[in-house]
Image (cartoon, grey):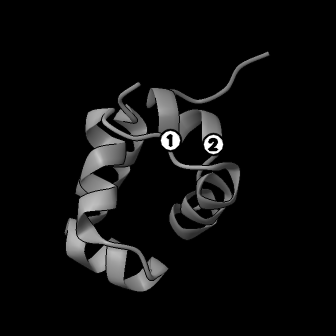
Amino acid sequence: MKMIGLYTIRKKKGYSQLKVAMDLNISREAISYYENGQRCPNLEMLVKLSEYFNVSIHYLITGKDFRI
């Protein structure tokens, strides 16, 4: 599953894949794989990405805000 929100928020903040990867101590390829749906991050990484970008996990995956 492509992480549409991850790509969207990263671009919106003007961050490169390399910057995010270095800040989170993972490979640039991992970020690319997450964005393109070639790999799914584990729960720990989802939480780190969510905190890093200050968005919900739901947003990272769908690119949409969670609504009840």
- Residue at the image position 61 percent from the left and 33 percent from the top: 58
Which residue does the image show at 42% across and 84% down from the upper left? 23
Question: What is the x, y in percent for residue 55?
Answer: 59, 51
Q: Which residue is mark 2?
A: 57
What quarter of the picture does the C terminus occupy?
A: top right
Q: Position of residue 67 (x, y in %)?
A: 71, 19
- Element assignment for label 1: helix
- Eyeballing the image, is 60 above or below 62? below
Q: Are marks 2 and 1 in contact (CB under 8 Å)?
A: yes
Query: From what the image shows, is residue 25 above or below residue 21?
Result: below
Q: Residue at 44% across / 82% down in the picture?
A: 25
Determine if residue 18 is in view.
yes
Question: Which image quadrant: the N terminus?
Answer: top left
Closer to the camera in the image, 47 or 12: 47
Residue 15 in view here: no
Q: Amino acid at mark 2?
A: Ile
Q: Residue at x 36, y 45 (%)?
A: 34
Residue under numbered circle 1: 60
Q: Amino acid at mark 1?
A: Leu
CA neighbours of label 1 inside 10 A, class few (<14), some (14 to 19), many (20+):
many
Q: Is residue 37 left or right of residue 55?
A: left
31 lies above or below 2: below
